[in-house]
């Protein structure tokens, strides 16, 4: 999964669902640290 593709997706989610985007961001960070 490319982070470049996540940027516009995250932007559109954040506009409509700020709380959901926060959870998505936390999940993304968890996946990044898990992959490290």
Image (cartoon, rainbow, N blue to C red):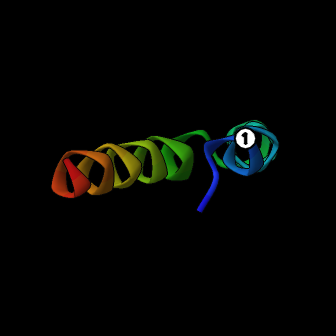
Split into 4 quadrants, where in the image is the N terminus? bottom right
Name the residue: 66% across, 48% down. 17
Question: Residue beneath label 1, please?
Answer: 4
User: Relative to residue 7, is residue 29 drawn left or right?
Assistant: left
For label 1, the SS is helix
Name the residue: 32% across, 43% down. 29
Across and down, in percent, residue 10 comes to 68, 44
Across and down, in percent, residue 27 comes to 34, 55
Name the residue: 64% across, 53% down. 2
Across and down, in percent, residue 7 comes to 72, 38
Q: Would you place residue 4 above or below residue 20 in this image?
A: above
Q: Residue 8 or 15: which is nearer the viewer?
A: 8
Across and down, in percent, residue 20 comes to 52, 53
Q: Residue 34 or 14: which is nearer the viewer?
A: 34
Mark 1, other Cα within 10 Å: few <14 / some 14–19 / many ≥20: few
Residue 33 found in image quarter: top left
The residue at the far front in this view is 36
User: Relative to residue 3, is residue 35 drawn left or right?
Assistant: left
């Amino acid at each position: 999964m490319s982070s470049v593709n996540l940027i516009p997706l995250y932007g559109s989610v954040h506009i409509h669902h700020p709380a959901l985007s926060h959870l998505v961001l936390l999940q993304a960070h968890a996946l990044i640290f898990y992959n490290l």
